[in-house]
Amino acid sequence: MFISLWDFFYGHFFRFWMKWLLRQMTGKCELQRIFDTYVGAQRTHRIENSLMYSKNKVLQKATLVVQSEVDKCIEDIMREKNINPEKDVSFKICMKACLLQISGYRQLYLDVESVRKKPYDSDNLQHEKLLLKQNTLMDTDNSMLWNLLMPTKKLKARISKQWADIGFQGDDPKTDFRGMGILGLINLVYFSENYTREAHQILSRSNHPKLGYSYAIVGINLTEMAYSLLKSEALKFHLYNLVPGVPTMEHFHQFYCYLVYEFDKFWFEEKPESIMYFNIYREKFHEKIKGLLLDYNVSLTLKI
């Protein structure tokens, strides 16, 4: 109750007078003071909050600006806040970097969500090519994912019990992509393509007689984790530190790869009694990652 009252009075009264007093003392608006004081994700985060909680409509709308309108938006902000570009030559550069990160994060979520909403459709040739992409140097019955993970073992049919060898539940992998749609498959293929050696190692470890788990199913589950962290805005500090401009799908895929690699280490360090405890340890891992993402200086990248 006390915190709610403080937030109300601070947002509606104290913040305005504090900003006014500091401007009189420094000759600079809050945005300029943030640029003078902070760097990295903390800078972008504070700029975003300053714009969001401003009573000025121009500043409020800046958090929703599209990338093509960023330059015009900055001009509008400078005009509203009476910022002289000759006296503060770095303001445009700093503000542009922040707005590109802010708008880029929002666009990245929309891009990821768009892919996630697409269910795997066996009648869609693009989807089938992604799962069954043919390699002209190998048997055309082999899927891309199978080629990457089981290069010395032939897949006998499109629908086969062999899919269980790489951690799918059913004879047809498409049935396991329901929750995350085509995004789950794209992430599995991305990790296998870009970190093939590590994918082989983790697949091998996932077949451990006591601590084993379903490689592909867990991979899809970790796609859901990466998606939920992006949606909840928990990835902002990570991406603001990692990407000086606009974050892309590539950065989302890379974060997924980090989760796959780190979860495998976590699972074997924890040594669960059985796979029946997966949800408990999955949540424990989730909480660990969320804790790391609270650090202003966080940058979670796969280091091999």
Image (cartoon, rainbow, N blue to C red):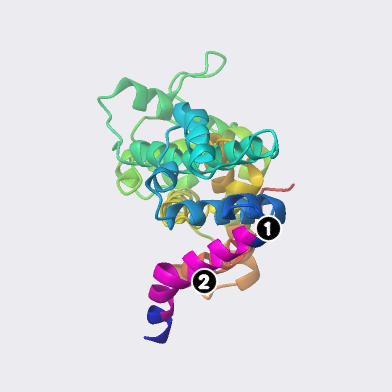
Q: Is residue 7 magenta?
A: yes
Who comes first in sequence, dot 1 or dot 2? 1
| Residue 180 percent location from the top left of the image | 35, 46
Observer able to see residue 263: yes
Q: Is residue 133 magenta?
A: no
Tell me which amino acid carries mark 2.
Lys
Neighbourhood count class around disc 1 (C-alpha, 10 Å): few under 14, some 14–19, many 20 upward: few
> Toward the viewer: 149 or 289?
289
Magenta segment, prevailing SS (helix, strand or loop):
helix
Residue at the bottom extreme of this rendering? 2
Q: Which residue is mark 2?
A: 284
Vertical relation: 157 (above or below) 271: above
Mark seen at residue 26: 1
Secondary element type, mark 1: helix
> Toward the viewer: 52 or 198?
52
Report which quarter residue 129 is drawn in.
top left
> Residue at (50%, 19%) from the top-left corner?
139
